[in-house]
Image (tube, helix red, strand yellow):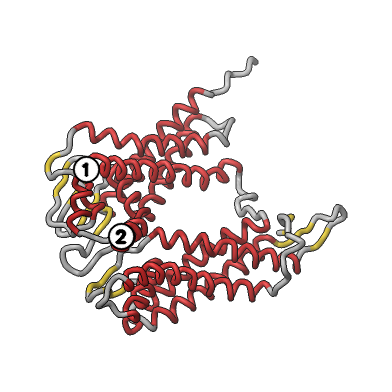
Amino acid sequence: MDEPTGDVPAREPSWPWWLVAVVGAVAVVAAGWLLMAGASLLGWVNSPEADLTSALELATQVLLLAFGAPVVIGGQLVTLTPLTLTLVLVLLGQPVAAMAARQLARRQATPDDTGALWVDGQSLVLRVTGAFALVQAGTLLLVGMAVDGGAHAWRAGLGGLVVGALAGFWGASRAIEHDPRRTWPAWLRAVPVAMGSALLLCLAGGAAVIGSTLFLHQDRVAAIHDALQPDLAGTILLVIVQLLYLPNLALWGTAWALGGGITLGDGSLLNLNVTDVGFLPAIPVLGGIPEPGLAPETTFAWLLVGVAAGVLAAALVVARRPRARFDETAAVGGLSGVAAGLLVVLLCSVSSGGLGESRLSHLGPELLDVLVVAPSVLGLSGLLAGLVLGLLRRPAATPA
């Protein structure tokens, strides 16, 4: 279906769109590797016994981790995805896909009587997204085959396909102002916005959990850092490593705040009711874990994060149904909350992983618990919010 394009910069150089997509997809992967190579070289310069080849190989392994591929580091299987780097790769790919979409739109657009340009937006976005994602998948597949004997190359290719599709679809849609929801019913168009808003609220709550526990236990965090005795370069590397997993920590905090709980390996469990952990590696951020034992009853107040997220999701969707009956608003509110909860579960699953194959083989949210509590808390609060909103704005009966 034809639709008007966004503004195509007149001064932008003219290139074949497929060339922009191909070169750009490879360049994004290379940029991600260079970022990690810089950090690896910092460690190599300050470690006289370190090997340059090993440092560069480590950068490649971390890059593959960002695309969800397991790697072997120091003889240990690592599967914990550094989501910060994954997000950076999506952000780097988005403008490249946008440029490819503008180049294709410039060649396909048909002007109308007013001078506005029209293209088949859906077809254009799918072409750019497909090309960008496939090239990135192929690039990661080749890189994966060169590491660890190619044992997990297919996982690298699959990760490249998913990350490339996200960046490609976002960039191409933004470039030509294509909205895939424009033919949906008004209330349904609000569902993705409601899900995203609820997710952001949950992540804010999770970040608040992590921030508050680090603040309350800052002495322990500082003690772990001092015990490691890092120099300036070592301190910078510690900060970089922990920043790479910042979104993971926020999602773990979200799972905890919703009542699902998290594990740090070896049968440990942290939830709103209890903290039960064993020996942990000397990583400063882990110093923020509360003391073992039962949690105070006030801890359950964190459940309000999920309640607020469900109410927000319901309110955004119900606002698009001004004439709906209260039973309809309740159903729509509940379904919106459940959908937002399932999105939280999906991201929590991506944030999980392991460091080795023994005690720390599973780190992150308890997915079965989160699968139960996240849709339940958000869905129930969304249903009640939809019911209340429907009753409050119930239209007055018209006189006969």
Which residue sits at x=33%, y=42%?
376
Residue type, numbered disc 1? His
Vertically, is 101 above or below 51?
Answer: above
User: Is 313 left, or right, of 58 in this rendering?
Assistant: right
Front residue of 134 and 400? 134
Kindly report which numbered mark, 1 or 2, lies closer to the viewer in this rendering: 2
Vertically, is 65 above or below 222?
Answer: below
Q: Position of residue 190 (x, y in %)?
A: 55, 43
Which residue sits at x=63%, y=53%?
179
Label drawn at residue 217: 1
User: Is 336 left, or right, of 74 in this rendering?
Assistant: right
User: How far, Cα to Cα, is label 1 from label 2?
Assistant: 23 Å
Vertically, is 175 above or below 326?
Answer: below
Front residue of 60 and 349? 60
Element at label 1: loop
Graded by Cα atoms within 10 Å as few (under 14), some (14 to 19) or many (20 or more), the crowding at tag 1 reads some
Q: Quadrant of the N terminus?
A: bottom right
Vertically, is 383 above or below 108?
Answer: above
Residue type, numbered disc 2? Leu
Which residue sits at x=66%, y=54%?
177
Give the mark, 1 or 2, whose residue is nearer the N terminus. 1
